[in-house]
Amino acid sequence: MNETTENFWKAWAEPVLETAPIFFRLYYDDQGRLLSYSMEHLPGNYIDIDAATYQLGSRNVRVVDSKLVHITPKKTVAKLVPGDTGTPCLPDNISIVVDQQQPNIKWRLTSHESD
């Protein structure tokens, strides 16, 4: 028998070493807001999660009573509206900004949130 064959049979006969368990964690702050996803042991508050949740890595989650809660982000719609304050533009073309002394319409950006 050559050395390669001997090494093969020797390795085959050795017991299989145990591997460390794999765990997935979500770390959060005192208000339940997500800090990070990790497979490491880090200091701080955490809950154990499954591999699918870890892989998804959603930022729209909170921890409430040590349970993961998915939250629906608010929809924000931004819109330009005319008013007394804002950026002065030509009365017939909003894309051209003009000096305050010229005839103008002022436009400002507003936003509205909804569920």
Image: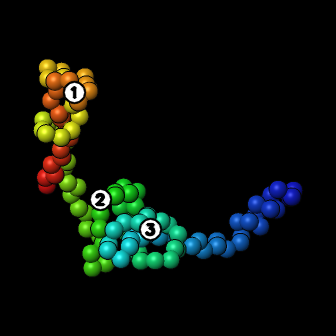
Q: Quadrant of the C terminus?
A: bottom left
Residue topped by disc 1: 101
| Res. 11 in view | yes
Kind of residue at badge 2: Asn
Q: Which of label 2 and label 3 is nearer to you? A: 2
SS type, badge 2? loop
SS type, badge 1? loop
Residue at left 41%, top 66%?
A: 35
Kind of residue at badge 1: Gln
Distance from disc 1 to disc 3, alpha carbons, whole Å, reads 62 Å
Distance from disc 2 to disc 3, alpha carbons, whole Å, reads 18 Å
x and y, in percent, of residue 108 in the image? 19, 39
Residue at left 12%, top 35%?
A: 82
Residue at left 20%, top 54%?
A: 74
SS type, badge 3? strand
Circle on res. 60: 2
Circle on res. 24: 3
Q: Which of label 1 and label 2 is nearer to you? A: 1
Residue 70: quarter of image: bottom left
Distance from disc 1 to disc 2, alpha carbons, whole Å, reads 47 Å
Q: Which of 108 and 43 is in front in this view?
A: 108
Q: In this view, does 89 lie above or below 4?
A: above
